[in-house]
Amino acid sequence: MKKFINRPENIVPELLEGFALSHPDKVRLAGNNLVARAVPKAKGKVGVVTLGGSGHEPGLSGFVGEGMLDVSVPGEIFAAPGAPRCLEAIRLADYGAGVLFIVLNHAGDVLASNITMEMAAREGLKVKMILTHEDISSGSDPEDRRGLVGFLPVYKVAGAAAEQGSSLDQCQAIAERMERNMRTLAVAVQTATHPSTGQPIFDLGDDEMEVGMGQHGEAGTGRMKLKTADETAELMLQMLLDDLQVKAGEELLVIVNGAGATTLMEMFILFRRVHHILKAKGIKLVRSKVGEFITTQEQGGFQLMIARMDPELTRLWDAPSDAPYFVVR
Amino acid sequence: MTDRITRKQFAGMISGAAARIREQHATLSALDSACGDGDHGAAMLRTVERLEKAMGDEAGDLRTVLRDAGWQVMGGDGGASSSLIGSFFMGMADTPPECDALDCRGLSATFEAGLKAMCKQTKAQPGDKTMMDALMPAVTALCAAAGAGKSPVEAFQAAAEAARAGAESTKDLTARFGRAKFLGEKTRGHQDPGATSIALMFEGFSKALAESNGESGNG
């Protein structure tokens, strides 16, 4: 493993310190290594909190900022944080109108979140939890589907609604509508190494790719010979369109999220093909994002996300945001 | 052989478990790299060190100490395993006052309450290739031994044996929970690291208890 780190046990505190120091006008570290906004939201607005393992930068703390999250609870490398820090984050993000707690569906995150919700209820805190689970490779049962880059539009629309003064119930409803209308599929071509242990997460042949790879390198189901960009885009987009049952005339948001080692060059080539296919099918590509929003170290591959939009979701997606890794003016 | 253990012995059992995890954490991480991301040993090390520290408070009310120990474990941020083991220890505090005596019945009731609390957080059952494969038989063996009037030393010996057998049985199982479930059939042939950790902890409990009992017997 070749990584610029110091002691393995210091990776998370050092990366958080550096992240906060590099965006001092936007974020600060609060309490027990929570990432919070530098300037808290006004009283009377809904707070938005998330949690997740580290090693996926800029996810998830890169989206703390005006118009998006209030507090993020970073865990250890690839491991969920525990309930105590989540509870601390919820207290911090409570401005008197309740807190929306956005959780990506992964076993450890869900366990910690359920315990957090119990403890928050005991303290009389007003919290609603929403689970994102849009990975179509992990079964047809929504409970089995993992939360991948779809967290991004959910943070965005819920964060915008909260910023505009919507109630907790309204923020939850908008987040749920976004969540129900999105689907993601990931593909991997190269393993990442675990930065603490130095071990590769999985093995993949030089000429192979694996469709359905999870966020932490959990193996997918479709291992095959490496395809061209166009073939890969066609295969993955069709699976997504079928699963979401997209019809001609509908409006989509498309996100191409690089896993860490896949270049923007490749992502643009892929996105171009997605654009061509949607145009040919008469599906409107109304918004798009191409870049790195959640990574897994130097893993090669990408996630393709599609989401069915409506005028309100698009308006919230377009609303101003000043998070370090998501600026909309 | 005594029927009742002291708070110091109880804390010693936790230290015994911590010692076993400390000895074996590299092995646990190696087991985890087969179907996970290879950090289970490090996470368990944080878990037992926090447990040991919290249980070191031998003067405090046991229930409060257990609840605090569980919360401390959760605060170790070790992913699913710290949430589960944390809920186990917090749950151990949910026993009726008559279980406060650290005799075999009280101890088994305390462990049973911990298991019950953990079961509220996960749907995993024995056979799903998780820590439940070791924990459930261990607690069952503990309760059976208590019911049969065995001493704490004998009961924890039985529990440790049951946990070990349960952990070994996971080799032939297919994962149905956590990240490993996405590997399905590929997980067969690998022993589950979570179940192995539980077996090591029970081995540590049993060994520490037997040794401390020997000391008090000699003294």
Image: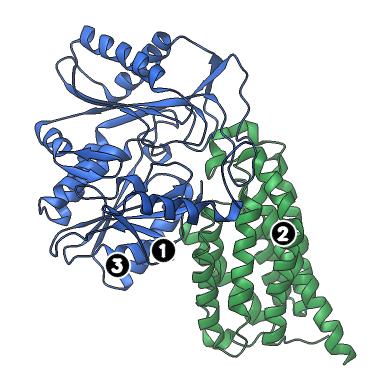
The residue singled out by tag 2 in the image is B199
Secondary structure found at label 2: helix
Extreme-top residue of the structure? A280
Q: CA distance from mark 2 to mark 3?
A: 37 Å
Q: Residues within 10 Å of mark 2 (few under 14, many from 20)?
A: many
Nearer to us of marks 2 and 1 is: 1
Q: Chain B colour?
A: green
Q: Which mark is residue A165?
A: none
Q: Which chain is blue?
A: A
Q: Who's the residue at 63% across and 39% down the image?
A: B35
Residue at the disc numbered 1: A85
Left or right? Give the position of A195 relative to B102: left
Q: Quadrant of residue A35?
A: bottom left
The kind of residue tagged 2 is Ala
Q: Quadrant of residue A283?
A: top left
Q: Nearer the viewer, residue B13 or A208?
A: A208
Q: Chain of mark 2?
A: B
